[in-house]
Amino acid sequence: MKKFLFLLFLIGYAPAWAQPSSVTVGEVHAVSTRMSPQTLKKRFLLKPQDPFTPELYEKAQDDLHDLRVFKKLEFSTQDRDGKKDIFIQAQDGYYIFPLAFAAGGKKSTAALSLAAGNLFKQGESTFFFAGGSDDGFTAMAGASLGDNFFSLGYTKLNFDQRFYQNGWSNTFGVFSTTDDEDEYANELLSQTHTRKEQLAFTYMHRFSRTLRAFIRPEYVRYSYSPSGLDNGSHNQLTLGLRLTDDVRKGANMGALSGYGLTDKKKSLQNLPRARQGYAANLFYSAGGRWTGSDYNISKLGLEAAWVLELKNRHMLVTEMRAQDAFEAPFSDGVLSSDLLSGMGRYDRQIRGTRGAGAAASFIYYLLRNNTGLLSLAPFYEIAYVYAGGRYRPHSGAGATLTYKLWRFPFPFGLNYTRNLQDGSDQVGFVFGGKF
């Protein structure tokens, strides 16, 4: 026993030279088509002298895949003097991708987008989007370059706002194609014509692979007819932090031209083990005389999501959202639609001073092959909003069936949602999102 204890003592206090040394990154070599090797290495997560682990090496590769501007992307390593030299072979190009779509229902909507990537050989992405419906018009332009993201958006809405029993009001927005005017006529308490004009600029900076911060000044103005409620300026400033290490992939706008599919083969293979991802967003909005607002505004919000991707690529997704309008006029109140996950479609929503919501869905792949992905995603979501002196629930359940081609960036399919409070049903077409 004494010999065993003595051996443990020697192991615990062995000199530094006797301990296994950690592996670090040696040199990073890159060859590319349009980008300069220096630009490519700058976008690569691992740098010389950084610790080298298989996990970090995998994440660094994923970062380059996610730029979505490559037709070919190969990685290899070589041991040298206790270090790992990394070699990157890349074939990058550029793309310009136009897209137009229209959707019908009780309201009609149409939109046009234009996306481009790597035009300036920096791995950057730029976009323009404009759309309109019976409720109004919106347009947005933005660019992502390295660790910086900029966007400018303008929205003008012209709609009737209706108020019902139990705190409900109709949903609105450029891409809201539902209309509750006939279904709930016997519950109508009042209505007012509303106009909203909004101009917002967003700047976001990435401090690390997972941490980002953003600032968003907004010009906002409401007009109600007949006059009342909170007519006037609602200018505000929003500050936020985002922490993300997600496993879900974003849209690949260059896929139609053959770019951004470098990890397709890898995505079709089962994982060696289940993996997790997360996303969190904390923001604070404020307004007052100092922003040119006619009203004091103070609102805090939190969003979080956790994803479990199984070995066979099916995914369990859970989400949570909360908001508290400590001081805000009617137009800046908390909406139940902002506390839900966005998986469901509803005629109506609840407005209050604070609230919280949670959701869960399971993305099951019925088909995965070289052509595309067919998935079925049942979901449940619920939110509670404090309105009229008590917390009022807004919940729904349903499923989304979508098919996504590898060479086309958006999924398309059908969504079914049942509102568990009023028993209403919604069936709608899905194209990249829910309209």
Image (cartoon, rainbow, N blue to C red):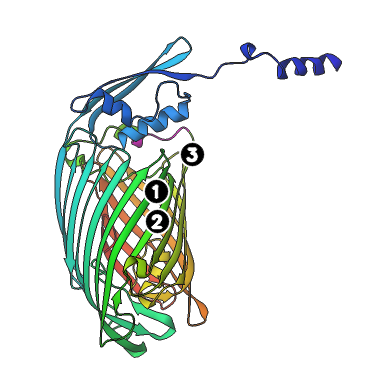
**Distance (Cα) linking label 1 and label 3:** 29 Å
Q: Residue furthest right?
A: 2
Q: Magenta stretch containing residue 269, yes or no?
A: yes
Q: Which residue is denoted by mark 1 in the rendering?
A: 213
The local crowd at label 1, few if under 14, some if 14 to 19, many if 20 or more residues have their Cα within 10 Å, is some
Give the prevailing secondary structure in the magenta stretch: loop
Q: Amino acid at mark 3?
A: Ala
Q: Say which of marks 1 and 3 sits in front.
A: 1
Q: Earlier in the sequence, mark 1 or mark 2?
A: 1
CB contact under 8 Å: marks 3 and 2: no
**What is the secondary structure assignment of the residue under circle 2?**
strand
Work out whether residue 335 can be spotted: no
Q: Which residue is denoted by mark 3 in the rendering?
A: 274
Percent across and percent down for residue 161 are 29, 80
**What is the secondary structure assignment of the residue under circle 3?**
loop
Please give left or right for residue 6 compared with residue 421 in the image. right
Work out whether residue 42 can be spotted: yes
CB contact under 8 Å: marks 1 and 2: yes
Q: Amino acid at mark 2?
A: Leu
Q: Which residues are magenta?
A: 267-272
Image quarter of the N terminus:
top right
**Distance (Cα) linking label 1 and label 2:** 8 Å
Image quarter of the C terminus:
bottom left
**Distance (Cα) linking label 3 and label 2:** 34 Å
374 or 322: nearer the eye? 322
Instruction: Determine whether 114 is above or below 302 in the image.
Output: above
**Label ID, residue 424:** none
Q: Magenta stretch containing residue 55, yes or no?
A: no
Q: Residue furthest front?
A: 290
Q: Amino acid at mark 1?
A: Ala
**Label ID, residue 239:** 2
Percent across and percent down for residue 31 are 25, 20
